[in-house]
Amino acid sequence: MSGTAGSDGKRVLVAKPRGYCAGVDRAVEAVEQALEQHGAPVYVRKQIVHNKHVVETLSERGAIFVDETSEVPEGAIVVFSAHGVSPEVRSEATARSLRTIDATCPLVTKVHQEAKRYAREDYDILLVGHAGHEEVEGTSGEAPTHIQLVESAADADKVTVRDPEKVVWLSQTTLSVDETMDTVRALRDRFPTLQNPPSDDICYATQNRQVAVKAMAPHCDLVLVVGSPNSSNSVRLVEVALQAGAGAAHLIDYAREIDESWLEGVTTVGVTSGASVPEVLVRGVLEHLAERGWGSVEEVTTAEETLTFALPRELRPSRAGR
């Protein structure tokens, strides 16, 4: 790994890609546009994305975050978060005459469509994911009688299916690629004809950020992952960094959370951020490190991301003459 470290050898490696993915960018912009077009307040079911700073910033602008649609006044506007919702939640919103804006990430929607398709074909669906995560709740709600949650390879022994020849696995989009495949291998040991999803469920951005961290981590005494504790993909980046050889790795929301003791004896610091993290928070970390002698910064690039998603249709300008 080349780089012009300072005279004392101190340097920072910054992973690229990092930060906002296309789905998060779209979801955050959806709330901003809803506020602009309709004025405050705009209600948002759950956190629009799993990032403390983003939620606080949007709250200051007039977004009101609620846990359930029952907390939204009848007839008001509600935005569904990037993680998706179940059909039951959509029905509740309709019953309350809520004006909905669906900011579900299109890659999550794809998994929902897969779940519905395999349920129609009467498959047992093994959903690899984390219990309680909004995305898992939304996907499971599409086919509750057909879906079983499998959290880890250790859970594979507990799975029971009606027909071992008619089983498919799907996954939460924000998991560790390596851990997911460990779980799938354990499931396939039990069900050799287990079918794969028609296309990869783990999102491109989650994979890209993990690949970048894997490339960077072996050269780092310390890796700082900017992200919130409830962000699945951010938590996974800490795990991936440690598995790939980083001396230590920590998850932080803000630069002020860096413990000075973490920096003792450290020469190379790696920095990355989860898919729901705005770049301003990474810049804050780099400034914090520069003030302490880590002013030499080198980007470690493993992919270029160009994907963008259109805004939810409810927010797009109506065509003239319609």
Image: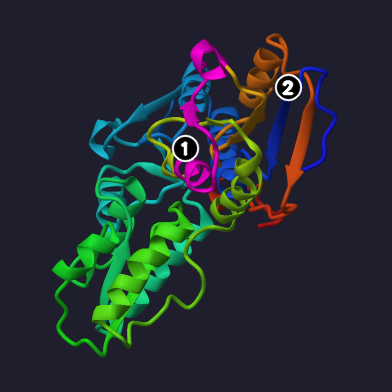
| SS under mark 2 | loop
In this rendered view, identify the residue nearer to me: 153 or 142.
153
**Quadrant of the rendering where the N terminus is positioned:** top right
- Whether the magenta-drawn stretch holds residue 261 is answered as yes
Q: Position of residue 142 (x, y in %)?
A: 29, 64
- Vertically, is 206 above or below 298? below
| SS under mark 1 | loop
Question: Which residue corresponds to the image point at 51% horizontal and 19% vertical from the top-left?
Answer: 262
Q: Is residue 165 left or right of residue 170?
A: left
Binning the other alpha carbons within 10 Å of mark 2 as few (below 14), some (14 to 19) or many (20 upward) gives some
Q: Position of residue 276 (x, y in %)?
A: 53, 38
Q: How many marks?
A: 2
Q: Position of residue 220 (x, y in %)?
A: 62, 35
Residue 217: give its label: none
Which residue is labeled 2 in the image? 10
- Whether the magenta-drawn stretch holds residue 193 is answered as no
Type of the residue with mark 2: Lys
**Quadrant of the rendering where the C terminus is positioned:** bottom right
Q: Nearer the viewer, mark 1 or mark 2?
A: 2
In this rendered view, identify the residue nearer to me: 204 or 296.
296
> Residue 298 lies in what quarter of the image?
top right
Question: Which range is magenta?
Answer: 237-264
In this rendered view, identify the residue nearer to me: 228 or 141.
228
Type of the residue with mark 1: Val
Which residue is labeled 1 in the image? 49
Do labels 1 and 2 touch, CB within 8 Å?
Answer: no
Q: Is residue 11 left or right of residue 116?
A: right
Question: Which residue corresponds to the image point at 59% horizontal and 19% vertical from the top-left?
Answer: 265
Q: Is residue 54 left or right of residue 229?
A: right
Q: Upstream in the sequence, badge 1 or badge 2?
A: 2
Q: Is residue 141 visible?
A: no
- Vertically, is 17 above or below 154? above
